[in-house]
Image: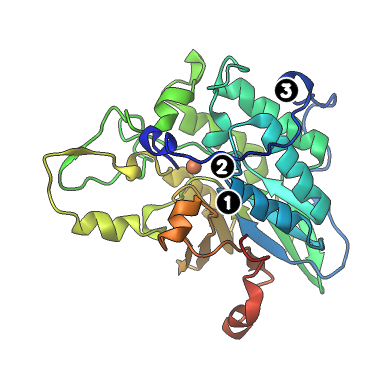
Amino acid sequence: MRSAAMRRGATKASARPQAPRGGRIPASTNGRESNARRCYGNGLVRVWAVSDLHVDYRENAEWVDNLARQDYRGDVLIVGGDVTDDLPRLDATLARLRDAFQAVAFVPGNHELWVRRGSYDCSLEKFEAILACCRVRGVQTEPITLAADGRQVSIVPLHAWYALPEEHPSSLYRDRPGADDIGLGAWADTHFVRWPEAIKGRAWEYFAELNRARLSRRYTGEVVTFSHFLPRLDVGLLGRRSAGAAASERVRFNFSRVAGTDLIERQLRALGAAVHIYGHQHRNVDRTLGGVRYVSNCLGYPSERARGLLAAARLVQVWPPLTRAAEEAGGSSAPAAP
Ligand SMILES: [Fe+2]
């Protein structure tokens, strides 16, 4: 997440990964990914989660580089979107992670669909280019099934887009005292996300429909779903903070406008998910509601970590589930932040 005003103060990475020639990722030739529901071997597989890597920040890029140098080759990494809006840099980052892990599962976030660099006519065209990039790199955007120690888990990515309150009741919008920035002038997506006419005002529906085929499948073992956007508002800190906010005449950005959609919640419930991973809000959450464990492990911005709004950079193990003692002994771990 990021407002345009915040972004202007960003410190960009000095050393960028090599961009593919022409600045675009070559599309694979065989359409949709052919290894959907791929089943991995019977090794000891752990599933880790992180989101909002924002590798345009040098500190974050260095953390990911350090992570990619570790040996996670038996493990799986879920990346819940917002790596970068720079497609060559996204490609390089996913390629590095793919080399380090047995598998990497990914859904694009809102930053990935920015078209500010002029290479794409619209955000949907860029979305398709990102999926093509993932196919070429062997990054999973379709469900996969894993086995570990006699147990099985299916990881199901859920594409999504947030619903504005003016667009659909599935919006997670929550009114609060004071005046909202209804035009979202401070929200960068307003300026950098461009939909084709056919889905303007209904991007939330378009992306939810993309999950239809994966919703109708039967999955083996426990189900772990993941999305970039929030499936419900009470999995973060926003609800408590908004409820206690004082009335103000000043027009303010209300994150709940762009937080997500409860269509994600309905879909993960339909899939019988035991765990759901999400990002976007730049808060660390690990909370069980209605029998589902919701985990948000955002790397976020260096300034947010420095201010204590986010935990130190780390991965969180989401499967197999850890006991509390194992978590305290380092189950949520990763190379230290540089
Ligand atoms: Fe986001």
Q: Where in the figure is residue 301, as x and y percent of width and height?
A: 49, 50
Q: Where is residue 15 in the image (x, y as percent from the top left)?
A: 68, 39
Residue 237 visible to the viewer: yes
Q: Which amino acid does label 1 sit on?
A: Ser
The residues bearing labels 3 and 1 have C-alpha atoms spaced at a distance of 23 Å
- Tell me the SS state at disc 3: loop
Q: Crowdedness of circle 2 by 10 Å Cα count: few (<14), some, many (20+)?
A: many
Residue denoted by label 2: 82
| Cα distance in 3D space between marks 1 and 2 | 7 Å
Position of 232 relative to 33 (above/below): below
**Within 10 Å of the Cα at label 3, are there few (<14), some (14-19), or many (20+) other Cα atoms?**
some
Q: In this view, does 35 lie above or below 59?
A: above
- Residue 141 appears in view: no
Instruction: Write the residue at 40% across / 26% down.
Output: 190
Q: Give the side of residue 273 with respect to residue 188, left or right.
A: right
Nearest to N terminus: mark 3 or mark 1? 3
Residue type for callout 2: Asp
The quarter of the image holding the N terminus is top left
Q: Does the residue labelled 2 lie within 8 Å of ligand 1?
A: yes
Element marked by disc 1: loop
- Residue that badge 1 annotates: 51
Query: Is the residue under label 2 in contact with that under label 1 (CB below 8 Å)?
Result: yes
The residue positioned 63% from the left and 58% from the top of the image is 49
Q: Mark 3 points at which residue?
A: 24
Q: Which amino acid does label 3 sit on?
A: Arg
Q: Earlier in the sequence, mark 1 or mark 2?
A: 1
**Residue placed furthest toward the bottom:** 325
x then y, percent, for residue 87 = 66, 30
Disc 2 from disc 3: Cα separation: 18 Å
Indicate the secondary structure of the residue bearing disc 2: loop
Which image quarter is the C terminus in?
bottom right
Say above or below: 311 vs 59.
below
